C-alpha cells in the first residue's frame, strides 16, 4: 500500500509540475521574428564572428531588426547576401570581396636569423623571447602558426617559415588578423593584384641586413606609379587599393622585390 501511495503521489506531483511548466512556458515565451529564423537558416552556420556579431544567431537577429546589412556575412558572400535580401524583401548592395594577405615574405631563405628557437610554437609567446623571436627582423612573420590554428577554413598555412594565404579558400572572417600579434595580416580587396609584402619600418641599410626582400623605403615605386597609388611612409611602401589599377609597374621597378604581383 505504501508503494502504491508513493507512486500515485509522485505521479500527481509530476502532473502538477508539468502543468505549471507548460503554462509558464507559454506565458514567458519570447516571440521570435519569423524572418529571423529564415535568415538564420540561410546563413552558413560557421559562427566565426567575422560579421562582428556573436555567431550566426546574433547576425540573424540584427538583420531581422534592420541593425545589420543583409550581406554582412563574409563567409556566405554575395550568394547568401542575395538570398537574405530576398527574405527581407530588399536589394542586396554589391560588396567588395576581401581576402587576407600576409605582409611578409621573409621565409627561411630570405630572412636572417639571430639564433635557433626550439620552444613552444606560439607567436604570442615570442614577446617573452630575446629579440622578440629568432628572426632578425622584428616586424616579420614568426611562423609559429597562430593564424593557422585560428582559421576555420584551412585557408592559411606556414610555408618555409612564413604564413601564406590561399585566397580562394579565404572567407575574410578576420580570425587570422586577430590572431597575429605582429599585425602582419590585413584584409584587402580580392581582385587587387599588387601588394607590398613587407611590414618593416627599419631604415633601408638596417632592413637589408635583416631580410633580402625587405622594403627599403627608396621611393622608386612611388615615383614610377602612373596613378599615384603607392606611397612611402616611415620607410615602408603602402598601396592605395582605391587608386591601384594593377599595372604592375611598381613590381617591376622595386629593387628588393618587396612588392609582389598576385594574378587572380
Image (cartoon, grey):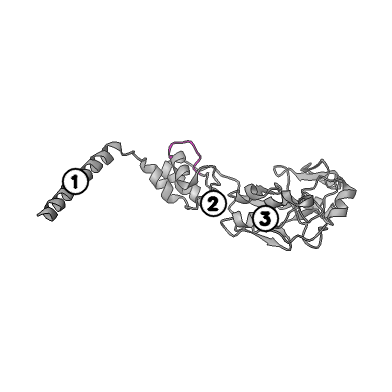
- Report the side of 171 relative to 210 (left or right): left
76 sits to left or right of 158: left
- Residue 46 x, y percent position in the rendering: 50, 53
* Residue 140, percent from left and from top: 76, 52
Separation of marks 1 and 3 at Cα, in angstroms: 56 Å
Quarter of image, res 162: bottom right
- Determine contact: label 2, label 3, CB under 8 Å: no
Which residue is label 3 attached to?
122
Q: Within the magenta stretch, is there residue 66?
A: yes
Q: Mark 2 = which residue?
A: 75
Marker disc for residue 117: none
> Is 65 placed left or right of 197 in the picture?
left
Residue occupying the point 75% across, 60% down: 117
Q: Do the residues labelled 1 and 3 touch (CB within 8 Å)?
A: no
* SS of the residue under disc 2: loop
Magenta stretch prevailing secondary structure: loop
Residue at 43% in and 39% down: 64
- Under circle 3, the secondary element is loop
Q: Nearer the viewer, mark 1 or mark 2?
A: 1
Residue at position x 83%, y 43% from top?
A: 235
89 vs 156, nearest the viewer: 156
Asked whether residue 77 is in view, the answer is: yes
Numbered range of the magenta stretch: 64-70
Question: What is the crowding at mark 1: few (fewer than 14 residues within 10 Å), some, or many (at least 20)?
Answer: few
Residue indicated by mark 1? 13
Amino acid at each position: 500500500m505504501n508503494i502504491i501511495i508513493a507512486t500515485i503521489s509522485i505521479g500527481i506531483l509530476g502532473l502538477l509540475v508539468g502543468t505549471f511548466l507548460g503554462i509558464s512556458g507559454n506565458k514567458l515565451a519570447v516571440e521570435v521574428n519569423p524572418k529571423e529564423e529564415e535568415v538564420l537558416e540561410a546563413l552558413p552556420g560557421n559562427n566565426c564572428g567575422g560579421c562582428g556579431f556573436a555567431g550566426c544567431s546574433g547576425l540573424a537577429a540584427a538583420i531581422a531588426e534592420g541593425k545589420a546589412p543583409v550581406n554582412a556575412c563574409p563567409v556566405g558572400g554575395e550568394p547568401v547576401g542575395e538570398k537574405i535580401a530576398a527574405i527581407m524583401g530588399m536589394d542586396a548592395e554589391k560588396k567588395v570581396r576581401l581576402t587576407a594577405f600576409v605582409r611578409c615574405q621573409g621565409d627561411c631563405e630570405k630572412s636572417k636569423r639571430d639564433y635557433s628557437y626550439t620552444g613552444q610554437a606560439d607567436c604570442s609567446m615570442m614577446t617573452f623571447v630575446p629579440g622578440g623571436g629568432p628572426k632578425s627582423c622584428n616586424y616579420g612573420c614568426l611562423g609559429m602558426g597562430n593564424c593557422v590554428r585560428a582559421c576555420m577554413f584551412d585557408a592559411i598555412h606556414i610555408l618555409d617559415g612564413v604564413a601564406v594565404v590561399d585566397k580562394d579558400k579565404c572567407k575574410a572572417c578576420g580570425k587570422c588578423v586577430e590572431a597575429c600579434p605582429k599585425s602582419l595580416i590585413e584584409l584587402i580587396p580580392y581582385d587587387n593584384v599588387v601588394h607590398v609584402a613587407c611590414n618593416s619600418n627599419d631604415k633601408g641599410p638596417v632592413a637589408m641586413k635583416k631580410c633580402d626582400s625587405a622594403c627599403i623605403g627608396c621611393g622608386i615605386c612611388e615615383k614610377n606609379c602612373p596613378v599615384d597609388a603607392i606611397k612611402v611612409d616611415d620607410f615602408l611602401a603602402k598601396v592605395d587599393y582605391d587608386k591601384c589599377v594593377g599595372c604592375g609597374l611598381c613590381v617591376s621597378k622595386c629593387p628588393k622585390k618587396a612588392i609582389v604581383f598576385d594574378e587572380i
